[in-house]
Amino acid sequence: MSRIAALLVVAVSLAGCDVFSTLIDGWKYAKAVESDLQASVGMKPAVGFQWTNGRLVSVTVTFPRIDDKKSLPELAATVRRAVASHFRQTPNDIVLGFSLGKSNPATTAQLGEDKR
C-alpha cells in the first residue's frame, strides 16, 4: 500500500513539474520533424532531443546513410528549417549525423579512407 502511495506522490509531483507534457510534446515534435525530413530528403532520420529545466538544449538528427543527392550544407539547411518549424523553442544546438553501418570496402572508398 505504501508503494502505491509513493508512486502516486511521485506521479503527481512530476505532473506538477510539467515533465510529462514536455516529454509528450517533444516526442510529437520529433515525429513531425522525422516525417517532414522523410518527405523532403527521402530518408527517415531518427530524431532525439534533450530538455533541461524546460529549455530545449539540443536536437539530434541521425540519417540511416549519407545522402548522395544533397550536399551537406543543403541537408543542414533542410534540417534547421524542419527543427525550427516543428519545435516550439529554438534549440541551443542541432546535431546532424549519419549511420555508416558495417564497414565494407565500398563505404571506405566513398569516404576516402585508407584501406589498411
Image (cartoon, helix red, strand yellow):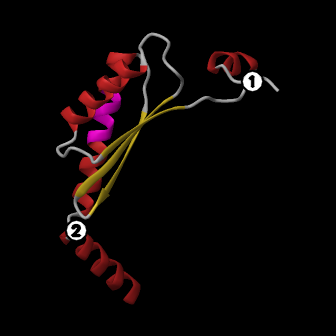
Residue closest to the eye, 42 or 28:
42
- The residue singled out by tag 2 in the image is 15
- The residue singled out by tag 1 in the image is 114
Magenta portion: prevailing SS class: helix
Three-letter amino acid code at the position of disc 2: Ala
- Residue 25, placed above or below residue 31: below
Q: Residue at x 52, y 27 (%)?
A: 64
Q: Is mark 2 in CB contact (under 8 Å) with mark 1?
A: no
Residue 53: give x, y in percent of width and height: 25, 64
User: Splitting the image into 4 quarters, where does residue 84 fall?
Assistant: top left
Asked if residue 1 can be seen in this view, the reply is: no
Q: What crowding class fits label 2: few (fewer than 14 Cα within 10 Å), some (14-19), or many (20 or more)?
A: few
Q: Residue at x 32, y 84 (%)?
A: 5
Residue 63: give x, y in percent of width and height: 47, 29
Report whether 62 appears left or right of 85.
right
Distance between the alpha carbons at the discs numbered 2 and 1: 53 Å
Residue closest to the eye, 81 or 20:
81
Q: Which residues are magenta?
A: 29-35
Quarter of the image containing the C terminus? top right
Is 22 a magenta residue? no
